[in-house]
Amino acid sequence: MVLALALVLTGCTQVIDGEPSAMTSDLDAGPQQPPAQVQGGTGSATDRLATTIVTGVESYWRQEFPTQFGRPWVNIHGYYAVDPKAPATAPACVKRALDLDDQALYCPQMDSVVWDRVELVPHLVNTYGQGAVMVALAHEMGHAVQNRIGIDATTQLTEKDRYPTILLEGMADCFAGSVLRGVVDRRVPNLELDRPGLDRALRALLSFRDAASIGGGIPEGAHGDAFDRASAFIDGYANGPNDCAGMTVGNQVFTQRGFISFSDAASNGNLILSDLLLYMLPDANAWFGQLVTSRDRSWRQPTLALDAPARCATPDASGQGPAWFCPSNNTLVVSSRALGSVHDALGDYASGMLLATRYAYASMAALGRPTQGPEASRMALCLAGAYTRAVFDRKSDFGLSPGDIDEAVDELLDENYAARDLSGTPPRGDLGFERVQQFRTGVLDGSAKCGL
């Protein structure tokens, strides 16, 4: 969080890389070749899993591509499961086998998908589950889809402003989202993914976010912060491949930014909790108060009860978590110890996200809207997103630092405090994926789309 500085945001990265770097052969020429077999591997369980995934994902595109884009799918020319420490296993498109360490990529000059079978695939399975391998390989195959719709290396070189790396990577994330929707809907042969698995797959994708850098603006070669990558994935999941192909720099909101000062970078953009409360609470009061008064209702600033007992007529209101709003006495109750745990673990705007949702509930109560139940939870997350966007767009005063919006996304994925209604009840069966989706609606579309 920064004060009197322009708003900037981003995340941290490993790379699911694979942006095209050379022109492929004419993918529309000649008769259709049979599906490629995976080369490499020893037949281990993770080797078999990766083979099943690329076979299933290509079957998805063989069916969907003609429907979405009006021409036949051309099978991908090759798949390589590589041991980075065995140089002889690397395909010609990789300078050194070690360049593949913990990586997956698409080789445009060979029209091939390549992955580290020794470290990457087992790590993804053990940490996040099989859906993580699906999203990683579906992302790389998404670059092959780009080539087949005419976004090849020559296009990128001649129209670099039109197709910056962050857009290409977002498009591949979007294509991956459409594939995983097909898997969840049981439309992809031999692949299955349940709802909790979808959450874990999204967490895996976001583990490849870009790290914050110095310099401001979107860095050249950026792949996107957690919000950018989640946003693109959600679009693909919700709307399908055609929307992914229509992504442009004009119709996408990218939140990745670099730090604009060394001091902000040194603190990773984080305020201490007491300063966050000092600066954010008046700001949130002003924004949500204006939201209420613009609808001809009165607004009273919630009274802060910091580390003080507070009685509330709403049963189990303290179940809201480290910060909770009591409508009967218009009080915001904050436990510095509990909120500090979120703050220290995830960053200052993870705790800020909890405060924003409690102010959202205060505004909903002032407007006579329901404050309990799934619809109330969705509205509060959306309004917190709209407030976040307002802070994001500022050029001075109270604003966000690189990584702040990712901290909100992390809270939504890893916790359910922000989604809890005023009875302290989280929506039954909700997913972090859905919480991010609801927050994203407010960020991208504003309070008008929150159902007030």
Image (cartoon, helix red, strand yellow):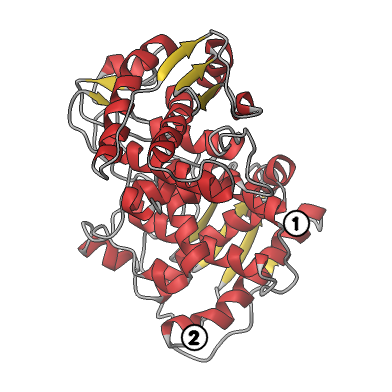
Does residue 256 appear in the picture of this structure? Answer: no
Location of residue 19 in the rendering, given as x and y in whole percent from the top left corner: 41, 56
Of 324 and 56, which appears nearest the observer?
324
Of 385 and 375, which appears nearest the observer?
375
User: In what element is the residue under mark 2?
Assistant: helix
10 Å crowding of disc 1: few (<14), some (14-19), many (20+): some
Residue at 58 percent across and 32 percent down: it is 417
- Is residue 250 placed above or below 385 in the rendered structure? below
Could you tell whether 391 is left or right of 21 in the image?
A: left
Location of residue 261 in the rendering, given as x and y in whole percent from the top left corner: 24, 20
Residue at 64 percent across and 78 percent down: it is 35
Location of residue 135 in the rendering, given as x and y in whole percent from the top left corner: 59, 56
Residue at 42 percent across and 34 percent down: it is 11
Q: Name the residue under label 2.
A: 66
Residue farthest along the bottom direction in this orientation:
31
- Is residue 435 placed above or below 54 in the rendered structure? above
Residue type at numbered disc 2: Pro
Residue at 63 percent across and 45 percent down: it is 427
Residue type at numbered disc 1: Asp
Could you tell whether 190 is left or right of 102 in the image?
A: right
Location of residue 150 in the rendering, given as x and y in whole percent from the top left corner: 35, 75
Q: Name the residue under label 1.
A: 47
- Is residue 200 placed above or below 93 in the rendered structure? above
Reading the chain from its start, which is encountered first: label 1 or label 2?
Answer: 1
10 Å crowding of disc 2: few (<14), some (14-19), many (20+): few
Of 330 and 324, which appears nearest the observer?
330
Q: Quadrant of the N terminus?
A: top left
Give how far apart the Cα atoms at labels 1 and 2 are. 29 Å
Q: How many labels does the image show?
A: 2
